[in-house]
Amino acid sequence: MSTPPTVTDSTIIATVKKDWTWLTSHIILLIIVVGLMVGAVYFVDSIVARHDAENSSKYSAILAEQVTQTKNLQNQLTADEAASAQRDVQYQAIISSLAQNIQKRDANAKKQQTTDAGLDVAGTASRLAEQTEATSGEITTSGNNVVLDLPIARRVVVDLDALPAAKADLDDAQKQLEAQNVLTADAIKDASDAKKVIAAQTLTLADSTKSCNAQISTLKANARKSKIKIFFVGFVSGFISGVTAHAW
């Protein structure tokens, strides 16, 4: 049976010194490694941050330009609407004046028709001469009859031929005007709806920008947390591995 080795104070001191030397050297090494890891993490993070800042500045400039263009278009639209409103007032006044003129002419025509219906032969001849711009002697009376020279009679026939077409054209023009009024009302409604859509899209774009910025901030925060977690996991794993290797 072998004799166990004698443990002396000098042996214990030597062992403690050896362990202390190993521990201090590894602590210093870990500090250096930690410093390099921290420096590497922040170096990479600074590069990424600088790249993100450059991209952010680039797209911010693009967004600012688009906002300016949109604002200019909105100002132009506002100016056009103001000018259109002023023209509409003028045109409405013209339309109102024309409508009054039509009413007056219709009233005068009905009154004249009532008068003409009661004219005697001389009055009828005089009225017809006035309407056809006949010269003296081209329209005469004979008893209870009105006699027209051939050129005047032809003029009356031509005017009578044009009357049905003029009445039909007037009716069609009124229908065309009514249809155009409907089209104009539809166009105004479409323009109003388009403005509402543009306003809604502008609000949606602003909200989307805010949401994207919030998501970017969240992603950056999560990335920083992940880096910190990886760093501490690596640090703890390295420290435990070193202690375990020394113990064995």
Image (cartoon, rainbow, N blue to C red):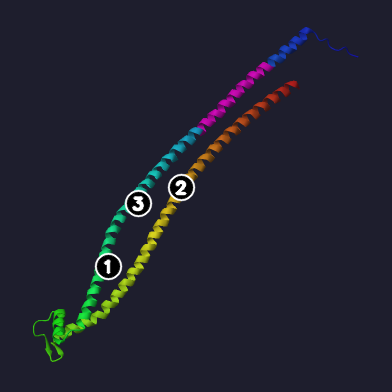
Residue 84 spot, x, y in % from top left: 31, 56
In this view of the protein, which residue sits in the foreground, 1 or 208?
208
Residue at 70 percent across and 14 percent down: it is 20
**Cα–Cα gap, marks 3 and 1:** 31 Å
**Cα–Cα gap, marks 1 and 2:** 44 Å
In this view of the protein, which residue sits in the foreground, 178 or 232?
178
Q: Which residue is mark 3?
A: 77
Amino acid bearing label 1: Ala
Contact flag, marks 3 and 1 (Cβ < 8 Å): no
Residue at 40 percent across and 41 percent down: it is 64
Residue at 56 percent across and 28 percent down: it is 40
Residue 173 spot, x, y in % from top left: 30, 72
**Part of the protein shown in magenta:** 23-48
Contact flag, marks 2 and 3 (Cβ < 8 Å): no
Q: Which mark is residue 99?
A: 1
Q: Which residue is mark 2?
A: 203
As helix, strand or loop, the secondary structure at mark 2 comes to helix
Task: Residue 91: name its quadrant.
Answer: bottom left
Residue at 65 percent across and 26 percent down: it is 235
